[in-house]
Amino acid sequence: MHELPVIENVLKIVIKHAEVNKAQKVISIGLKIGELSDINNEWMQRYFEFASKDTIAKGAVLKIERSPVIFRCEECKESFPVKIREVKKILCPVCNGSKVTFISGREFSINQIEIIQ
Amino acid sequence: MTDIRLIEVKENILADNEKCASEVRQRLREKDIFMLNIMSSPGSGKTSLTLQTLRGLKNDLRSAVIEGDIDSILDAEKVSQEGVPVVQLRTGGACHIDAFMVNLALNEMDFDKIDFVILENVGNLVCPADFDMEAMRERVLKLNPRIKIFEESCKTGDGIQDWVKWLREEIGTVKLI
């Protein structure tokens, strides 16, 4: 269910850019979603197909790029990616420090769209 | 001839909600009002915790509640028996309350008569479905090692006092009470 409101926003932004650029059709949409998001790629595509069926974005393919979860070590200030669903404990790969701060991994943006003019 | 072009968009999908959320924060900050967002699965005790918290704070603070529900008004009726103002939000099927809904609910409140607002969010079966306390503790601490976790029971009352005491102190950081 989380995907549907998100998709409505995606569609709104895509159509706005498509119209400004006088697109006849939108072919693909490049999304950047952080690894920390529980959004499911397959449901995104399905909801998108439903939501876009009467628009110029009908049939567009969602190309979802997952951006990694990044933490920063408070000891040595090194930033490093973490496979958050796999590791048990987050340790700095440089100094082995365990005092870490979450930096990024919750991104939710549209990078680009591919259109036919 | 067809011409395929790649257009740079670079727009945050949730920008509208984030903008509205900062508006909500601003409105609350102007009046030194503290808001608490309670989220968890259906039946896990959000309303019970809301009631316990209201009772724990009733001598010191003027509380209000925003009740989120997909369709019913049962919880709102229960909470209003505590004698606090309640605004009911019915999401009509959507699983979460977003910033726009919170903003609308705040319009219904008299800010000069409130110190503290509890937002009882919509219970969602999918998001926080894991009730393994140790696993939960491990995962949450992994993401934020400084977070404070309270274990409490609304049935026995265990832990409620600690929670209310902590909450009162937190509210005290935005409002002199």
Image: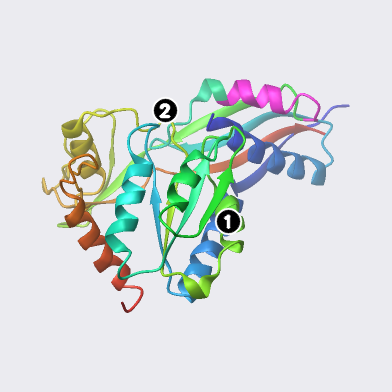
Name the residue at the right extreme: B1
Q: Nearer the viewer, residue B79 or B4?
A: B79
| Position above or below: A29 against A20 | above
Q: Quadrant for residue B60, please give it.
A: bottom left
The residue segment tinted magenta is: A44-56
Q: Is residue A45 in the magenta section?
A: yes
Residue A77 image offset from top left, x and y in percent: 22, 57
Quadrant into which the C terminus of chain A falls: top right
> Type of residue at label 1?
Ala
Magenta stretch holds residue A106: no
**Residue A103 appears anywhere in the view:** no
Q: Residues within 10 Å of mark 2 (few under 14, many from 20)?
A: few
Which label belongs to residue B132?
Answer: none
Say which mark, if any, is on residue B105.
Answer: 1
The residue lying furthest to the bottom in this view is: B176
Position of residue B19 measured from the top left corner of the image (x, y, whole percent): 57, 58
- The structure's colour scheme is rainbow
Helix, strand or loop status at disc 2:
loop
Residue under the image location 11 percent in, 45 percent down: A96
Residue at 32% x, 79% y: name it: B176
Residue shown at the point (49%, 45%) measured from the top left? B77
Q: Earlier in the sequence, mark 2 or mark 1?
A: 1
Judged by depth in the image, the label closer to the viewer, 2 or 1, is 1
Whether B136 is drawn above or below B170: the answer is above
Q: In the image, residue B81 lies at what x, y percent?
A: 44, 52
Q: Is residue A53 left or right of residue B76?
A: right
- Same chain, labels 2 and 1: yes
Residue receiving disc 2: B125
Q: Secondary structure at mark 1?
A: helix
Left or right placement of residue A34 versus residue A90 in this view: right
Which secondary structure type mostly characterizes the magenta part of the structure? helix
Amino acid at pointer 2: Leu
